[in-house]
Amino acid sequence: MEKKHRTIIEPFKIKVVEPLPLPSREEREEYLRKAGYNLFLVPSREVTFDFLTDSGTTAMSAEQWGAMMVGDESYAGSRSFEKFEKVVRELTGYSHVIPTHQGRAAEKLVFSLLAKPGMKIPSNNHFDTTRANIEQLGAEAVDLVIAEGKDPQSRHPFKGNIDLARLEAFCQENQGKIPCGMLTITNNTGGGQPVSLENIRGAAAIYRKHGIPFILDVCRFAENSYFIKMREPGQQERPVRDIARETFALADGCMMSAKKDALVNIGGFIALKDPAWVDRLRSLLILTEGFPTYGGLAARDLEAMAVGLIDVLEESYLEYRLAVTRYMAEKLNRLGIPTVQPPGGHAVYIDAKSFLPHIPPAQFPGQALVVELFRSEGIRSCEIGSVMFGKAATMELVRWAFPRRVYTQSHFDYILEGMEDLVANKDRLRGMRMTYEPPFLRHFTARFEPLLDG
Ligand SMILES: *Cc1c(COP(=O)(O)O)cnc(C)c1O
């Protein structure tokens, strides 16, 4: 078909709107002072563009809101659960569906069953909460992403791939110690980088050969499937739903944070092919989340997930979704702002170390940029560098994670216009000093002071 337009548009009309907070620069300076220059401590009513996370920040569709009104809030055997279960079964091909209130609750249940001291669980990269849930139980979370996945400038099309040779060796060396093997799609820790179908097939074969159950972390399965359609040889003509189905079929089960690719504000689930773990998981579920037909959610949340899991595979949506990060990364690069390459599915990562070479890591170049982005543009973003990881940080990144269906092209263009000024004046930016350091997870509550010249 002939394509006349270069612009990829938002494939939706807007029915419900929320005013965009538009404080002045002076007001923002005041909020920054009050918040100790930590954006986690700034109230959202003062934030114009909130790129802190893509988790639970989706704008739902009219159909999702409509479905919520027919939620059957019965304690047991809810009609909404039946609907949700049917959608998850059709999507994944897994028979056993266990709802949870979010992704980490699914992780807690699965690892409570599987992870014991001395055990090891391999993946491309474990997400923070996955790792924490495994290590909390005394087991080890092992990352085996390919070397290109650790190189911010490598343009490998599937930087989320697991290193299959290392995985094979790992499984041989650790026989009897691996209760399950994983893959995270897309690879969040590596910047939302996709995993190829070929790689998922390869990992599945290795896990199968060693008798290890294969569990996917599928928070962004739809974005991953669309990357496969775009980039993997031979996949271009396939409906993205087929690619997603094949992905699920290669594994034995999955864990999902519905706050990502189920297009909802809260929710998650576990789904499994085999019934072996199901009774024990449901007993644990009743202990900490709730009865198996609601799992810590309201039935209306199950309704919204059921619709979201179908909507998210709409190809016009996915084309638009992946165009957002691509567009922003390309335009930022053209302005001289370096980013991790290539952009992933849900976020753009600005390389603050190369952008602000005059600010040493000890003076938190990422935090200096986060603060300036809020001061000058009203953007809330997240430092992933020396503030978050201390001296262990290898990069100084600033993440813009884009909420789904929330901001429009003119918002993005407006931001890019503002970036021109920031680039012109970047040599004037100064570093930060940490004035309060909490004992753990310091990025959430630390406080800072800007360093002055001289
Ligand atoms: C968000 C996320 C989780 C955890 O999900 P929550 O709903 O935030 O608890 C797990 N894995 C990945 C890859 C994620 O992105």
Image (cartoon, rainbow, N blue to C red):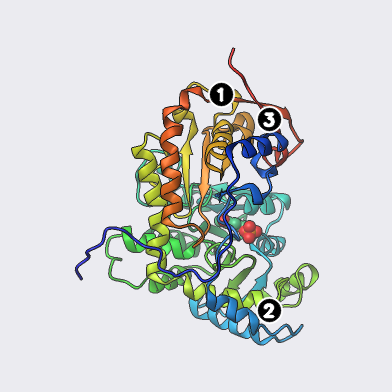
Q: Is residue 437 left or right of residue 3?
A: right
Q: Amino acid at mark 2?
A: Ala
Q: Which residue is mark 2?
A: 299
In the rendered image of this protein, does residue 354 appear above or below residue 88? above
| Callout 3 secondary element | strand
Asked if labels 2 and 1 touch by Cβ distance under 8 angstroms, the answer is no
Q: Which residue is mark 3?
A: 448
| Callout 2 secondary element | helix
At horizontal 71% and vertical 78% (from top left) the residue drawn is 292
Q: Which residue is mark 1?
A: 430
Q: Nearer the viewer, residue 119 or 235?
A: 235
Calculate the distance from the C-alpha at mark 1 to the C-alpha at mark 3: 12 Å
In the rendered image of this protein, does residue 101 appear above or below residue 19? below
Ligand 1, image quadrant it occupies: bottom right
Farthest right residue?
A: 287
The yes-or-no answer for disc 2 within 8 Å of ligand 1 is: no
Task: Pick the quarter of the image with the N terminus.
Answer: bottom left
On the image, the x and y values in percent for residue 386 come to 60, 32
Q: Nearer the viewer, residue 218 or 347?
A: 347
